[in-house]
Image (cartoon, rainbow, N blue to C red):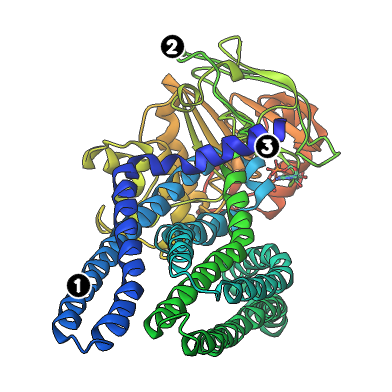
Amino acid sequence: MKNIRQTLSTIGKMLSPLKKSIPSIFLIFIFLLIDVYCNLTLPSYTADIVDVGIQNTDFNYIISVGTMMMTMVLIGVLATIALSYFSSKVSAAYGRDLREISYEKILKFSNFELNKISRSSLITRNTNDVYQIQIFLGLLFTTILFAPILGIGSIIKAMELGTDLLWIIVVTFASVAILLGIIFIRTVPYFKVMQELIDKINQTSREILMGMPVIKAFIRQDYEEERFEKTNEEFKEVNLHVFKTLFLMIPAMTMILNVMIVLILYFGAYDAINGKILTGTIIAFIQYSTQIVISFLMLGGFTIMIPRILVSGRRVGEVLNTEISISDGPIDKIDENPTIEFKNVGYSYPGSEKETLKDISFKLEKGKTTAIIGGTGSGKSTILNLIPRLQDVTEGQILVNDKNIKEYKLSTLRERISYTPQKAILFQGTVRSNMQVGKEDATDEEIEKALNIAQVDFIESLDDEVTQGASNFSGGQKQRLSIARSIMDKRDFYLFDDCFSALDMNTEAKVKENLKDLKESSSILIISQRISTIMDADEIIVLDEGKIIDKGGHDYLYKNCDIYKEIVSSQIERSEDLIYDNEETASFTIDSSSIKKAAGGK
Ligand SMILES: Nc1ncnc2c1ncn2[C@@H]1O[C@H](COP(=O)(O)OP(=O)(O)OP(=O)(O)O)[C@@H](O)[C@H]1O
């Protein structure tokens, strides 16, 4: 029952874009009926010309019936043109709208849903699958609805001719049905495989294109070529099997049609000699029989397409019906000077038995800078992602002003937060358009101010191009642009996920100095592996294997937390820019011009 309801709801959602096109669909039906009517009258006119006009050598009759035939042909052609125009219009608009609603839904997906369906599959579903449905809709209006109306009309007209030859149509019908059955059985199971292989090709190509520098550096071209070839070959084999069978249909059908005509002529000739039927009637009967068989064929072709469309429909429907795991709460207002508090938070990634975060508690508040330091994979980014609810806690809770974060509307929550991810993500466009992602109506002055704070001194103007993936900028430049974007607008919480890592010490020190103003009216959470980035934070959280080992100021941790001390020591040994001033206070300053190591010979 639940399944039926879900299927109906999916169909409802998928058909909803057609609502706007109802007037055009109505016109399609009108033109379709006109077209079928014209097609049905032509064989009768042929019969009249042969049986009356030619039989009686009545030229006037032939010309007048011929003129009627020409008029019908003309009206039929105009109706076909109008039919094609409106069905293309409706199906193209439908494709656009379906892509749009599916895309809107995808934009609401959390990481969990994105990983569940996979990004490559989402691309194929939103392009190839929607296109298959769009093409099908076009065919539905021009061919599939046309076929049964023409077929039924032709059967009635053939019966009206009053011949004994109807059994030939029945035999032909049966032969076509057997042929279609064979084709159906041989192709249908492969359609799902075909769509899955398109996903796989998409995924492999994407991975290879993204990983090009690594592939080249490690001389893996041959291996990757082979990997791609394997999927490509599999796709070719399935395609070949399906199309070999489908192409068999054309010669087989031509043969069945020709045999039908020969049978009609053979048995019709007997009846004609015996005076039971006129020559023109035989010609009209052949024409109606051909129309009947062709209509049946069109329907057969459509039946073969159905499984493929069902696969595409199911795949798009799955996107539209996916339950979003992260949804809005009822509260749409957050009071001034909000706080965010982690209370015994735990997190496990879906499908993973390992707990990534365990018993995490800390508080973010106005005027305070909190930092998280810890080894790779210790769970730092996971903590950060929980704040704008890119994923939800699996244990404990996060409170915003003492209320569970899930009780707030997502947009209400997110508009208070600025998030700078670990990997600088910029969009194709200009520097200005990227900065306006941070503040839609930002003026040039505001943008320039943010760029200055983030030390973006490498661009000529705000109109400088940002190519796809910002490939025309270096890693450190991308990070600076990404930081600038995150400070475009005033927010209560600024979250920086290791986004200073590609900056040289000098630039980092300048950016950090410039960011100090933010702290007065906001709260800053900064993740880094570098001591120099986080050492002056009000509270530093030391994370190890998803657990908080200790927290406090730099001096406190240096004296009391072994892991923190180890990190500090290891970085002093490596660093040429840190100057360890005083072992007692364990404080550092940054000076790129000199190298100095102190503290017990370190
Ligand atoms: N999508 C995911 N599915 C399953 N496990 C994941 C996923 N993302 C991260 N993890 C796991 O969660 C753990 C914490 O990852 P996280 O990215 O939070 O670490 P991190 O401390 O930020 O690491 P780094 O300093 O390298 O960025 C890792 O062990 C990682 O394997």
What amino acid is labelled 1 in the image?
A: Met
Name which of mark 1 and mark 3 comes first in the sequence: 1
Which residue is rendered at x = 54% and y = 64% of the image?
299
Counting residues from the N terminus, which is met first, the one under dot 3 or under dot 2? 2
Q: CA distance from mark 1 to mark 3?
A: 77 Å
Q: Is residue 335 above or below residue 199?
A: above
- Given this view, does label 1 or label 3 mark the residue nearer the observer? 1
Question: Farthest left residue?
Answer: 60
> x%, y% of residue 394?
75, 27
In this view, the residue in front, 234 or 80, is: 80
Provide the residue designation for mark 1.
68
3 and 2 marks in contact (CB < 8 Å):
no
Confirm whether residue 511 shows in the render.
yes
Q: Is mark 1 within 8 Å of ligand 1?
A: no
Q: Secondary structure at mark 2?
A: loop
Q: Which mark is residue 81?
A: none
The label on residue 382 is 3
Helix, strand or loop at label 1? It is: helix
Instruction: Name the element at disc 3.
Output: helix
Q: Is ligand 1 within 8 Å of the beta carbon of the residue shown at mark 2? A: no
Q: Is residue 458 at least partly visible in the picture?
A: no
> Where 566 falls versus 167 (above or below)?
above
* Pointer 3 residue Cβ closer than 8 Å to ligand 1: yes
Label 2 sits on residue: 336
Give the mark, 1 or 2, whose residue is nearer the N terminus: 1
Within the displayed image, which quadrant is ligand 1 positioned in? top right
Residue at 49% of width from left, 68% of height from top? 295
Q: Amino acid at mark 3?
A: Thr
In three-dimensional space, the C-alpha distance between marks 3 and 2, rounded to whole angstroms, equals 26 Å
